[in-house]
Amino acid sequence: TPPEMAAKLHWLHAEFLDAAGEADAADAKFADSYMATGQGPEYSAHFYNQGLAAIQAGFHDDGKKTLQMAVRVDPGNELAKKALASLGSATPLRVNKQGEL
C-alpha cells in the first residue's frame, strides 16, 4: 500500500471515530495517519512547536492537546514528553522572577 493511501485510510477512519464521539480513538488514528506518511518526526516537531506557542499565548488546554499529539505521532519526541511532564496537573507554565518562590 502506498504511504499516501494508508495515510488517507487512517484519516478517514479518524473522521468516522470523531463523528461518533470517540475523540481519543480519533486522535490515535489521526496520529497513525501522520505516521503513515513517512514524515512522523517532522509532523511531531511541528505539533511540539505549535503546542508551545499555544501555551505561551495562554491557550493551555489546546497547547497540551497539541503536545500530546506530538507524542502520539512520534513517541520518541523527548522534548514534547518533557514539556507535557512540566505541565504537571494542568497548571499553566510560569517562570518565577528572580527573588520569587
Image (cartoon, grey):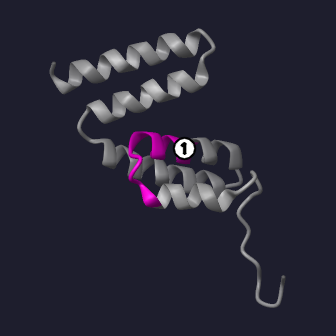
Residue 99: x and y, percent?
A: 82, 90
Residue 7: x and y, percent?
A: 29, 24
Residue 27: x and y, percent?
A: 51, 28
User: Image point 60% across, 54% down: which residue?
Assistant: 84
User: Image point 39% across, 20% down: which residue?
Assistant: 11
In the rendered image, the vertical position of residue 30 relative to residue 100, given as above or below:
above
Q: In the image, is 48 to the left or to the right of 61? A: left
User: Image point 15% across, 22% down: which residue?
Assistant: 2
10 Å neighbourhood of mark 1: few (<14), some, or many (≥20)? many
Q: In the image, is 53 to the left or to the right of 12? A: right
Q: Is residue 76 magenta?
A: yes
In the rendered image, the vertical position of residue 84 relative to residue 93, given as above or below:
above
Residue 48: x and y, percent?
A: 48, 52
Quarter of the image holding residue 82?
bottom right
Question: Which structural element holds mark 1?
Answer: helix
Q: Is residue 61 magenta?
A: no
Quadrant of the rendering where the N terminus is positioned:
top left
Three-letter amino acid code of the residue under disc 1: Gln
Count of marks, rendered view: 1
Task: Decide whether the magenta segment is chiefly helix, strand or loop.
Answer: helix
User: Image point 40% across, 40% down: which residue?
Assistant: 73
Quadrant of the rendering where the C terminus is positioned:
bottom right
Query: Mark 1 = which residue?
Result: 68
As drawn, the residue found furthest toward the bottom would be 99
Q: The magenta stretch spans which residues?
A: 66-78
